[in-house]
Image: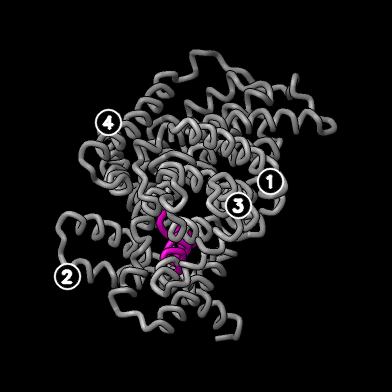
Amino acid sequence: MSQTERLKESYKEVKMIGSLLTRIRSLLTFSLAIVYLSNLFIQSVWINHLTLVLIVIVIVLSLLVATGSSKIIAYISIVLSILILLTYNAPFSIWEQAIEANLYLVVMFTLVPLLRIPIQFGGYFEALQAFFQRFVNTYSRFYILVSFISAFVGILVNLAVVPLVHEISKASNLSANKKILSKAITRGFATCTIWSPTMASIALIIQLTGATWYLFFPFAFLSGVIAGMIGYIMTMIEERSSKGEQFDSAPDTALISDSVINYRKVIELCIFGIILITAIAIISLYTRIQTIVVVSIAAILFPIIWLTIISRLPILWREFRGNYLHNSVPGLKNEIILFVGAGLFASSITYSGLGDYVPQILFWFVGDNVTLMSIVIIVLGLMISAIGVHPIVTITIIGGTVKASAYGVTPTYMAMLLAITWAMGITMSPSSATIITVAGLAERSPLQVGPGWNGRYAIISSAILLFIMTIFRWLQLI
């Protein structure tokens, strides 16, 4: 056997081992989610030990294949956390608590992609593409529809909305304008990350601040709507002022007759989406079960109910064994280590007492002035996001150490502050999964798509939303 043939054989073996490890990691991650949810009701000590073993294995396997800035941030967070816990002689119970601190985020992020299956295979994709072809013939309409679909579908499928909307938008010739397409997707998706209970950001923020989602929802939803309006206005102004852009006219787009558009499917998708959000809110309110738990359970049960109603249930098992376990779950490696790393770091600085310095330093700068405190948190969050640090780091540290009661504000106000910081942070952070994915589809660098195209939007939106929340606070509404 020649040297070349040996190298080919070695490469095949390595590839097979890598594929096997990916399959194992995927199955263990899904098993972890099911075991964790089950034990919330069973309350077994042995199952709790099993959960710990599973999360440790999943972390190790994910760290081996993680990529980009997420890998760097996660490694730094985990190494620093280990050093802090060792320095302060933390007992095993603290290590266990720290490792599992953000486990609920890992569980939700693992299960939510299941909601993508009925959307992809329920006939909605084709209906939305036809809708694009028929009605989207100006850049203004293109931005509105892309951003709206990104926000609405994003509620159901989270980050998976980016490639989905990108494919749908190809039905219009206007999608050739990568700048407008990128802005519409990122800014549209940001609006639902401010309020949606299916978002990991909201689950984390509600947990950290102790806010109640149904009290938080009205203010957060209003902020999402306002952020969407700001995004539209700014995009129109920015693009009209750029050379060569004409928004009153657009490239020719092929029109199709009304009869080709399946309006029933468009309405059906809206109805199922509204039912999902309403059910989550009502169940959380009346059962007092944490919203994050309700969302995770809904991600399992709702696709079954949905596909049963539209007579396409067999597709669920096929896609679960196929795309979900082979692509969706393995693709969460970066998010998993980020969540675990942030939770581990927050727990370590809390146990060591180092976290006490954060509110002290903040107090030195702003005193007990709530407005200054709010400005500093948002500005700091945006600055750190712009240089490439994922917002989860800032939110976890500030949310875990700065208490609402210390400034005489409600948990709802503090949650709103962090939600705005997160939403605008991921819109401009070159390390956020949203920007990285959009940049890849637009064939641009994350720095250009993030701080370059969305930096001004993030700053202006944050300022306006903070001003509105300040008025609500003065009126004692929040």
- The image position of residue 18, as x and y in percent, is 45, 71
Which is more foreground, mark 3 or mark 4? 3
- The image position of residue 334, as x and y in percent, is 49, 62
- Residue highlighted by disc 1: 455
- Residue highlighted by disc 3: 376
Residue 73 vertical position relative to residue 462 in the rendered view, above or below: below
Sequence-wise, which precedes: disc 3 or disc 2?
A: 2
- Residue highlighted by disc 2: 46
Distance Cα–Cα, label 3 vs label 1: 17 Å
Which is more foreground, mark 3 or mark 1? 3
Query: Helix or strand or loop: what does disc 4 sit on?
Result: loop
- The image position of residue 327, as x and y in percent, is 44, 55
Please say whether residue 375 is one of the residues in the magenta stretch. Answer: no
Which is more foreground, mark 2 or mark 4? 2
Q: Is residue 333 visible?
A: yes
Residue plotted at (42% across, 39% down): 196
Which is more foreground, mark 2 or mark 1? 1
Residue plotted at (62% across, 22% down): 136
Please say whether residue 336 is one of the residues in the magenta stretch. Answer: yes
Sequence-wise, which precedes: disc 3 or disc 4?
A: 4
What kind of residue is marked 3? Answer: Val
Q: Which mark is residue 311?
A: 4
Query: Helix or strand or loop: what does disc 3 sit on?
Result: helix
Q: Left or right: 82 with respect to 176? A: left
